[in-house]
Amino acid sequence: MSRLFSPLALRDVTFKNRIFVSPMCQYSSDDGLPTDWHLVHLGSRAVGGAAMVMVEATAITPEGRISPWDSGIWSDAHADAFMRITDFIRRNHCVPGVQLAHAGRKASTDVPWRGGKVLPAGRHPLAWEPLAPSPIPFHPDDPPPREMTRGDIDRLVADFSAAARRAARGGFEVVEVHAAHGYLLHEFLSPLSNHRTDEYGGSFEDRTRLLLRVATEVRAAWPARWPVFVRLSCTDWVEGGWDLEQSVRLAILLKEVGVDLIDCSSGGLVPGAKIPVAPGYQVPFAFEIKHKARIATGAVGLITDAHQAEQIVAQDKADALLLARAFLRNPYWPLHAAKVLEADIPWPDQYARARG
């Protein structure tokens, strides 16, 4: 039997296999609201056999967006707009998930296909002033972000909690707290971007304080029967930055506050980091955290081949795989992987005539 196509249970949610659609920014929202693009993009991956489809980084406030065209969930109207998408995903035997995010100092940028440059506040009609733990820009020539006050931090925690409640209203069954890729919560974790001298900066305990507060409040706001994930950048790939050892320590603490799975990515905090990109290059992070912190993990990063994916799960290196570009190339990746692995899984009735 294929381990890749075996079920995975987390709390009261049973995923039909170990293949999840990773959150991927689409830069196609209208004032944070999902559009027909999202219905087709996300729905096709559910039809294609994924066990979970996770919506892209979805901002908890307007200022938390990476770009003005990002997904958002800062109002009940946003939650309600997701209902037709989550309903479609669920009706196709797939679990709907959403990644809750705040972009921090990497906010207020243009879309990647126009260069992704910062949209300066006051000089662009859709721009705003980014927030960060310290007034250190992502690129040296970017405008510095505004350093968050303690009041800002308290509001941020409340905004994550409110976003989790709205996600439940919107029909999601998994929430993931985004603490990776150089966005706000990751910025607090790393000493490269966090130069604070109060209780939110300095020591490991103080740099992790905000994420632990957010995770605790999200867990309290989220239905107990459904899982909470946290995405971490397990290393900055830079000397003196956040690293795997700290990630393991943090994963232990996150498990204690009720987090169910660590989604193990890396990088994104600083430009120019030397990353040894290769097939499965981030899988060792999932393995280390899974076995040292004794928590479920998701592996990511250049996982493209069915046999490669099967081996990762079968060798207990991770509990699930979150695929991104593989799903952009082929929305039906699980159906084709099952054929390669000789796993007998159902196809949508409408597509059954194409099953070879």
Image (cartoon, rainbow, N blue to C red):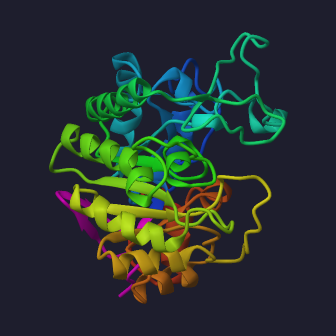
Which sits in the foreground, 2 or 285?
A: 285
Image quarter hosting the C terminus: bottom right
Which sits in the foreground, 119 or 79?
A: 119
Q: Could you say where residue 12 lies in the image, as x and y percent from the top left?
A: 17, 57
Q: Could you say where residue 220 lies in the image, as x and y percent from the top left?
A: 19, 41
Please say if 13 is above or below 104.
below
Q: Is residue 14 left or right of residue 48?
A: left
Which sits in the foreground, 214 or 321?
A: 214
Image quarter hosting the N terminus: bottom left
Residue at figure coordinates x 15%, y 48% from the top left: 224
Question: Does any portion of residue 318 appear in the rendered image?
Answer: no
Residue at figure coordinates x 35%, y 82% from the top left: 291
Residue 121 within the magenta-colored segment of the rendering: no
Question: Does any portion of residue 141 appear in the rendered image?
Answer: yes
Q: Could you say where residue 249 lies in the image, as x and y percent from the top left?
A: 38, 69
Q: Main secondary structure of the magenta part?
A: loop
Residue at figure coordinates x 35%, y 29% from the top left: 154
Q: Is residue 172 left or right of residue 38?
A: left
Q: Is residue 86 left or right of residue 101?
A: left
Residue 5 within the magenta-colored segment of the rendering: yes
Please state the extent of the stretch shown in magenta in the rendering.
Answer: 1-19
Q: Could you say where residue 62 lies in the image, as x and y percent from the top left?
A: 52, 21
